Image (cartoon, rainbow, N blue to C red):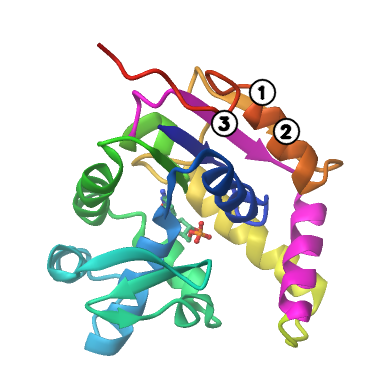
């Protein structure tokens, strides 16, 4: 079990996917579950401030992680929602609804079902602290906010979407503040997490540092007796 936590734009998805490929583990993106709930709430016209309504939706939603042509794919109630998860506004709505304890309780239970059997790289905000506290390796990635905004800017640009870097920086800081200061499971490194500042590292360098932490250096851990 490998837990990768950190704020937005820090490279969690890139690193976690590469790590899953390198180790042969499944890749579970827990942020996608909060985003999928935001999408479902839009569709059903449930407000992101309605904690009980959102928890009900979270309980009924069926979420699946698969791989299509080598790319991670997220299924919501049988429908491929992968591109929709990145629609404008969804990040903000996911962050807002993630502050409710009753919503988190339901999603954390689903995350434990998905990851509890091991052989998994799970990324999020509270994986090392709450979801999989027994993870074999815990990593907390961080980077300077300006660098994270720059990375997000380049990601959008690659997709042909122009968003001002200053606007992205503002959004990242707002979301960070909310994710770090919420009362339940705030974004924070687990006491036994290895901290990696990725500001001046490329993805290959980050990956090498994490692989060096793995039992058997990426060749997998001997099964527990
Ligand atoms: O990783 P992401 O940007 O896709 O996550 C979207 C939001 O979901 C994030 O701002 C906070 C919330 N989230 C969370 O509270 N706990 C997680 N384990 C993952 C995401």
Mark in the foreground, 1 or 3? 1
Residue 119, quarter of the rendered image: top left
* Nearer the observer, 171 or 158: 158
> Is residue 48 visible to the viewer in this orientation of the structure?
no
Residue 154 part of the magenta-drawn span: yes
Q: Which mark is residue 78?
A: none
- Would you call the spot at circle 2 few (<14 residues within 10 Å), some (14-19), or many (20 or more)? few
Structural distance between the alpha carbons of marks 1 and 3: 12 Å
- Would you call the spot at circle 1 few (<14 residues within 10 Å), some (14-19), or many (20 or more)? few
Image quarter (top left, top right, bottom left or bottom right) of the N terminus: top left
Q: Which residue is mark 2?
A: 208
Classify 74 as above or below 5: below
Left/right placement of residue 78 relative to residue 7 reads left
Give x and y (percent) for residue 49.
30, 70
User: Which segment is the magenta one?
Assistant: 132-158
Image quarter (top left, top right, bottom left or bottom right) of the C terminus: top left
Do residues under tags 1 and 2 come within 8 Å of each other at their CB atoms? yes
Where disc 3 sits, the SS reads strand
Residue 128 part of the magenta-drawn span: no
> Is residue 211 visible to the viewer in this orientation of the structure?
yes
Q: Which residue is mark 1?
A: 212
Give x and y (percent) for residue 143.
74, 43
């Amino acid at each position: 079990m490998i837990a990768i936590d950190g704020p937005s734009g820090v490279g969690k998805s890139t690193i976690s996917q590469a790590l899953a490929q390198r180790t042969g583990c499944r890749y579970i993106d827990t942020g996608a579950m909060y985003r999928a709930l935001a999408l479902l709430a839009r569709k059903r016209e449930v407000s992101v401030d309605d904690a009980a309504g959102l928890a009900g939706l979270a309980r009924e939603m069926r979420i699946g992680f698969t791989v299509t042509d080598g790319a991670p794919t997220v299924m919501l109630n049988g429908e491929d929602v992968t591109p929709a998860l990145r629609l404008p506004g969804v990040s903000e709505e996911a962050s807002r609804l993630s502050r409710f304890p009753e919503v988190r309780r339901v999603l954390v239970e689903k995350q434990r079902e998905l990851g509890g059997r091991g052989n998994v790289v799970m990324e999020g905000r509270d994986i090392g602290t709450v979801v999989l506290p027994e993870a074999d390796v815990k990593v907390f990635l961080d980077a300077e906010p300006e660098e994270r905004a720059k990375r997000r800017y380049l990601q959008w640009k690659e997709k042909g979407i122009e968003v001002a870097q200053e606007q992205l920086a503002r959004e990242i800081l707002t979301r960070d503040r909310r994710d770090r200061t919420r009362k339940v499971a705030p974004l924070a490194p687990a006491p036994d997490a290895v901290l990696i500042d990725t500001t001046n590292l490329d993805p290959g360098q980050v990956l090498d540092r994490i692989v060096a932490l793995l039992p058997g250096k990426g060749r997998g851990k001997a099964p527990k007796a």
